[in-house]
Image (tube, grey):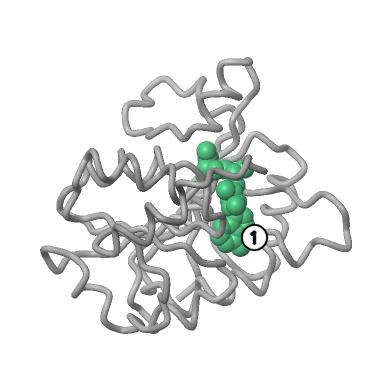
């Protein structure tokens, strides 16, 4: 996702250090200090404009959430939502998810969400896919053994790749959906911006939920 530059984004982030962390490594092992209450911590990598993580934080006040995003403009758009919602259980981080083990201690995270991650279709960009084995190794390190990885996408190629990548890594699948929005009881699903766009076009949404073997 490429967003047009928004000159207000950087200053808005600078004015709201209570909501946005720009040096996540400094909080390694100490993330709970950023929240009103100590409670299980869930992160989304590549939150984009933040609709999913904001809605999750509203829906589950008994959990803490971090929305991580490497683009300043997208982080700024998500921040606008948080400035309005003022959720005490949500923090935003403007950084690249490839540094996850520098940002979080082993077992600091209870669950990880990936939504409509960039597909990077060319073979030479495989390492950038958020379900590539080096990312999975980082998720395994920072997430508690009881934690789950949840991944949604409209991109069939990336989904098939991810099924294989997770399987080769030795992860176990809890559930796989090949057309999420045709599921009869979908009340638990929190939509992302991309999900709304693609499902309105009638495209199937793929989802998997998996955990590391213990
Ligand atoms: C296609 S958008 C989807 C946004 C949102 N999750 C949704 O479903 O509407 C993917 C987002 O992931 C971000 N992203 C991709 N790789 C990332 C990484 N390694 N670390 C942090 N963010 C990343 C991109 O900047 C982009 O905003």
With respect to residue 104, does 39 lie above or below? Answer: above
Question: For residue 178, what is the image quadrant?
Answer: top right
Horizontal arrangement in the rendering, residue 177 relative to residue 8 (left or right) = right
Question: Horizontally, is 88 left or right of 181 in the view?
Answer: left
Number of numbered discs on residues: 1
Q: In which quarter of the image is the N terminus?
A: top right
Q: Where is residue 124 in the image (x, y as percent from the top left)?
A: 88, 63
Q: In which quarter of the image is residue 137?
A: bottom right
Does dot 1 land on a helix, a strand or a loop?
A: loop
Q: Which residue is drawn at 29% across and 64% down?
A: 17
The CB of the residue at mark 1 lies under 8 Å from ligand 1: no
* Rendering coords of residue 34 (x, y %): 22, 69
On screen, residue 206 versus residue 86, left or right, reads right
Residue 54 in sight in this render: yes
Q: Quadrant of residue 133?
A: bottom right
Q: Looking at the picture, how far across and down is residue 166, in whole percent?
A: 64, 62
Residue closer to the observer: 140 or 41? 41
Residue at 52% across / 47% down in the picture?
Answer: 7
149, 175: nearer the viewer: 149
Quarter containing the C terminus = bottom left
Q: Residue at x 68, y 45 (%)?
A: 159
| Looking at the image, residue 133 lies above or below residue 73 | below
- Visible residue check, residue 176: no
Residue 105 position within the rendered picture, expressed as x and y whole percent measured from the top left = 38, 83
Q: Residue furthest left?
A: 37
Reading the image, the residue beneath label 1 is: 131
Point 56% across, 16% down: residue = 200
> Dot 1: few (<14), some (14–19), or many (≥20) neighbours within 10 Å?
many
């Amino acid at each position: 996702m490429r967003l047009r530059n928004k000159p207000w984004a950087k200053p808005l982030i600078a004015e709201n250090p209570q909501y946005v962390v720009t040096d996540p490594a400094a909080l390694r092992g100490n993330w709970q200090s950023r929240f009103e209450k100590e409670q299980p911590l869930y992160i989304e990598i590549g939150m984009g404009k933040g609709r999913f993580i904001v809605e999750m934080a509203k829906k589950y006040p008994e959990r803490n959430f971090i929305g991580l995003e490497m683009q300043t403009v997208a982080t700024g758009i998500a921040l606008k939502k948080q400035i309005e919602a003022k959720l005490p259980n949500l923090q935003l981080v403007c950084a690249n998810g490839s540094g996850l083990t520098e940002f979080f201690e082993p077992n600091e995270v209870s669950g990880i969400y990936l939504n409509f991650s960039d597909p990077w279709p060319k073979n030479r960009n495989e390492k950038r896919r958020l379900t590539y084995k080096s990312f999975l190794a980082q998720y395994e390190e920072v997430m508690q053994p009881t934690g789950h990885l949840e991944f949604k996408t409209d991109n069939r190629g990336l989904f098939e790749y991810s099924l294989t990548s997770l399987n080769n890594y030795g992860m176990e699948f809890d559930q796989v959906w090949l057309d999420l929005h045709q599921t009869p009881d979908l009340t638990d699903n929190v939509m992302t911006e991309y999900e709304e766009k693609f499902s309105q076009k009638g495209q199937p949404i793929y989802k998997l939920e998996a955990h590391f073997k213990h």
